[in-house]
């Protein structure tokens, strides 16, 4: 294959580490006039334009952006593809919301044509919002995951997804059985896990909708293939937690149910965790598990305020999740806007650099993909976005008053949304142009 080399010149920013561990100044790298060089889908150099330009061949193709910021592609560690058509459903909290809106909406994915149509809309929406990697719930139907992976493969995206396993406490039209969920998951793993940049996640919906037999088979699958992911929900809503205690009286709380069935581990991501206690955070951290912080959803469904400082105290890996359709936006910028307010309500601060970390490198670490995505380090995948300082009249005017990159970043996360994302690149290819 001929060498394809391209360079992008703009302000460039990426995370180097968690500000909670190294302090804010050491947590990021910023080039006011930076250059990002891409070769064959990977980043080959990053630095000051003045340093790098003299070392590049004179005929290299350089795209120069004015009033724009290049950052790594954003990482959504929790989202539901089959809930694309029900964002913003009125009035209910988690359990009634599932029964009233979610299950009927997900039932439509029995139809392959519908699954393909929505997979296409969903992926376009991710890319329009600058999200280049997501950990995705399908529906209970394998075709929802096939449709998603087929569309992601065409664009060479790094994506993770799985078919929901759900064999009780849901309508008959939407349940599998322990055995069929095992066989269907296995077939999807064989077809997709490790193909190109795709990975599979074993996906028991949450403890109340799985029998002990199904949870045991989910744990068994994790032992049968290397590097599989596991995704589920935990401790999102107080009624939900009481229900889990009633369904599993022999277990020592919600997390212990998953622990018992061997679902904790380095590639396990638990969504929400709003009401986790200290001991549960410690156990999650000890097993290398991660939590997806989903602020728009936690507010929209009235679930509660995620305690990020407690997670930091335990050095628990935390990524950011939109949780569409419980969440109300595909935009991780808007999700950070809400995350900031969730911290304000708890008397805590969320610095813009911690926010950047959560949406990029923190997500990559939660997914154990930090050697591939989440930063702009040479050698990693060329998944990056271009944010436009002039996306809206207000943003343009407001950013002219910003004195430094910290202020600029914070305003981008407060006023920014899909309009702010000028371009999205995946594996060096432009996959979205506003
Ligand atoms: N818990 C179980 N299923 C779901 C879901 O689809 N969305 C959310 N937010 N929580 C859940
Ligand atoms: Zn969810």
Image (cartoon, rainbow, N blue to C red):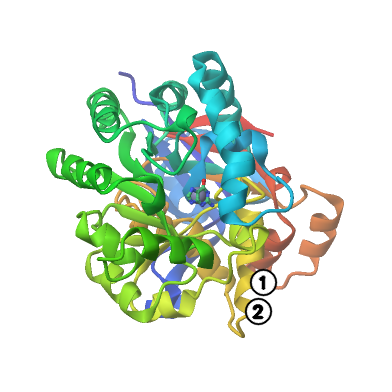
Find out whether the residues at labels 1 and 2 contact each other: C-beta distance under 8 Å: yes
**Residue situated in front as seen by the camera: 42 or 190:** 190
Provide the residue designation for mark 1: 341
Q: Position of residue 143 (x, y in %)?
A: 42, 21
Q: Residue furthest top?
A: 113
Query: In this picture, is 15 found above or below 407?
Result: above
Name the element at disc 2.
loop
Report which quarter residue 414 is drawn in.
bottom right
Q: Residue furthest bottom?
A: 347
- Label 1: how many Cα within 10 Å (few below 14, some 14–19, many 20+): some
Q: Position of residue 309 (x, y in %)?
A: 47, 79
**Residue situated in front as seen by the camera: 237 or 319:** 237
Query: In this picture, is 195 found above or below 345?
Result: above
Q: Is residue 202 left or right of residue 342?
A: left
Name the element at disc 1.
helix
| Residue 24 visible to the viewer | no
Provide the residue designation for mark 2: 345
Query: In this picture, is 6 found above or below 108?
Result: below
| Residue 410 visible to the viewer | yes
Q: What residue is shown at x 42% (from left), y 72% (from top)?
A: 276
Q: What residue is shown at x 58% (from left), y 55% (from top)?
A: 94
Q: Is residue 208 left or right of residue 301?
A: left
Query: In this picture, is 176 found above or below 100?
Result: above
Q: Position of residue 14 (x, y in %)?
A: 48, 59
């Amino acid at each position: 294959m001929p060498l394809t080399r391209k360079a992008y010149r703009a302000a460039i920013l990426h995370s180097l580490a968690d500000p909670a561990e190294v302090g804010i100044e050491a947590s990021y790298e910023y080039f006011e006039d930076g250059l990002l060089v891409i070769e064959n889908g990977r980043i080959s150099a990053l630095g000051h334009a003045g340093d790098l330009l003299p070392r590049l061949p004179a005929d290299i193709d350089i795209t120069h952006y004015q009033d724009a910021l290049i950052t790594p592609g954003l990482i959504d560690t929790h989202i539901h593809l089959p809930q694309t058509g029900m964002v913003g459903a009125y009035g209910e909290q988690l359990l009634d919301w599932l029964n009233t809106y979610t299950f009927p909406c997900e039932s439509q994915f029995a139809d392959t044509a519908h699954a393909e149509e929505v997979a296409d809309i969903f992926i376009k929406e991710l890319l329009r919002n600058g999200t280049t990697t997501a950990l995705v719930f399908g529906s209970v139907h394998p075709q929802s995951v096939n449709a998603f992976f087929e569309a992601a493969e065409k664009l060479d995206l790094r994506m993770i997804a799985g078919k929901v396993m759900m064999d009780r406490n849901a309508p008959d039209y939407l349940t599998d059985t322990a055995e069929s969920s095992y066989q269907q998951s296995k077939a999807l793993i064989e077809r997709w896990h490790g193909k190109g940049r795709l990975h599979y996640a074993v996906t028991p919906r949450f403890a109340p909708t799985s029998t002990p037999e199904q949870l045991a088979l989910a744990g068994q699958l994790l032992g049968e293939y290397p590097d599989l992911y596991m995704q589920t929900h935990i401790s999102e809503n107080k009624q939900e937690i009481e229900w889990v205690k009633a369904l599993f009286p022999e277990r020592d709380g919600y997390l212990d149910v998953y622990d018992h069935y061997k679902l904790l581990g380095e590639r396990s991501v638990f969504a929400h965790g709003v009401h986790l206690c200290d001991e549960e955070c410690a156990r999650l951290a000890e097993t290398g598990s991660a939590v997806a912080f989903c602020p728009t959803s936690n507010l929209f469904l009235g679930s509660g305020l995620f305690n990020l400082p407690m997670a930091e105290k335990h050095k628990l890996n935390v990524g950011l999740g939109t949780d569409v359709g419980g969440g109300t936006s595909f935009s991780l910028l808007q999700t950070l806007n809400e995350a900031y307010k969730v911290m304000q309500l708890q008397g805590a601060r969320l610095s813009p650099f911690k926010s950047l970390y959560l949406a990029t490198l923190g997500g990559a670490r939660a997914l154990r993909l930090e050697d591939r995505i989440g930063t702009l380090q040479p050698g990693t995948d060329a998944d990056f976005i271009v944010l436009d300082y002039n996306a809206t009249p207000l943003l343009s005017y407001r950013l002219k008053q910003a004195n430094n990159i910290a202020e600029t970043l914070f305003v981008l996360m407060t006023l920014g949304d899909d309009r702010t994302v000028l371009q999205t690149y995946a594996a060096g290819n432009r996959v979205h142009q506003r």
